[in-house]
Image (spheres, rainbow, N blue to C red):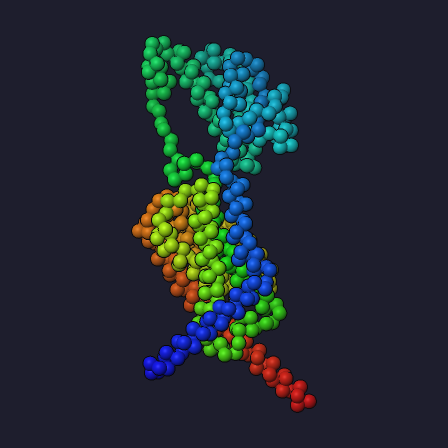
Amino acid sequence: MNVEGLLTTIIEGCRDAARIWRDELRRIFKDEGVIIFFVVVPLIYPLLYSWIYNNEVVREVPVVVVDNSHSQMSRQFIRMCNASPDVKVVAYVDDIDEARMLIGRNVARALYYIPSDFQTRIYRMQQATVSVYCDMSLVLAYKAAYQTAVMVSQEMNSEIQIKLSGKYTKREEEIQAKPLDADGLALFSPAGGYGSFVLPAVLMLIIQQTLVLGIGLSAGTARESNRFQDLVPAKRYYHGAFRIVLGKTLCYLMIYILMGAWLTVVVPRMFHFPCLAHWQDLLAIMIPYTLACIFFGITVSCLVRYRENVMLIMVFVSVPLLFLTGVSWPQTEIPGFWQGVSTLFPSTFGVRAYIRLNSMGGTLSDVLTEYRILWLHVVLYFIVACLVYRHQVSLAQQHAKEAEAEAEAEEMK
């Protein structure tokens, strides 16, 4: 092929891709379901999720107390627990059964049981105990109630040791109470809260899930109505699966440049999540991640026969995908088989790279492995997407020929 012919082919290909881009954009804005997944969900869902967890930690967890000691020491323990920001004593009852009824009715989330010999054992220089019963249906509430009881008991232990120490200076009393002290610092999450911990991963996962849902919904609609022209815009494009994928990709990329910026830049700043990434590094990660999600969505769309199928598939795998990223469950504790499965999804490496950049203050050199794998996903899923649409083109040609043959047969009759 000479230079002039090559130039003509390139120009024609660009025109075809531009037409597909335009037609796909029209198709998106005519489909309410696709608009919901491409625009409404990325805009509203992160705000709702972030607003729910904006307090970062659970405060004033309702606790019921069974105080069988009725002593000065037991009242001090209860007062100190109630004075903490994490616990609020809402009721005093006479026995554990009554306390369990309150927990069962969600009046309280935990129970503090103080035995009758609580103060007596302390005065006898024996170890006393306080039993903590927690409702494990909400782990954050369990953490608040249990840790409060532990910290109050440690504080009371220190006071008792100081009284028994016989030391003369404040410093000697401090050393006697705490010979070895430790300062805890929550790295990369100053508040030590749930929002800064898991929401960055959710925001990145939303990009993949909404793209796959929107692309699959559009493809399922086309197949349900047997509108092959929605998959292949016109017969003149039958020879260009590459042009179809390129045109559709430009359309989705145009939308998700805005949605990606909203999810990864605007929302974290609105809710004061850690934002430590340099914009150049963040952009370098978001380009391959968005492209990989688009091509992955186009690949998945070949499995969608009916409009609802893609929603069933993606809703089912959303929680497992979050676990497979290694954010809510340690990556080292994930079985090897499931780690292998996780490599199939762009979200696995996109989430890890984003958290290390934005939440931990890393640079692009710190996420080179994830960066390279995302570009590998781009190449592999682009090839698969082209093969998928080539198959769709062949089906469209076959159906077109069958339709023409049936029309000719009817005319002959």
Q: For the view shown, which residue lies furthest in the right direction? A: 413
**On-image quarter of the C terminus:** bottom right
Where is residue 115? Give x, y as percent.
55, 18
Q: How many marks?
A: 0
Identify which residue is drawn at 38% across, 31% down: 184
Vertical arrangement, residue 346 with respect to residue 83, above or below: below
Q: For the view shown, which residue lies furthest in the left direction? A: 365
Where is residue 401? Give x, y as percent.
57, 82
Q: Quadrant of residue 188?
A: top left
**155 sits left or right of 134 in the view:** left
One can see residue 325 in this view = no
Q: Quadrant of residue 191?
A: top left
Foreground residue among 288 and 259: 259
Where is residue 170? Give x, y as percent.
35, 14
Vertical arrangement, residue 311 with respect to residue 175, above or below: below
One can see residue 10 in this view = yes
Identify which residue is drawn at 50% across, 36% down: 55
Q: Quadrant of residue 173?
A: top left
Where is residue 126? Give x, y as percent.
46, 14
**On-image quarter of the N terminus:** bottom left
Identify which residue is drawn at 55% across, 36% down: 138
Identify which residue is drawn at 44% across, 42% down: 273
**180 sits left or right of 83 in the view:** left
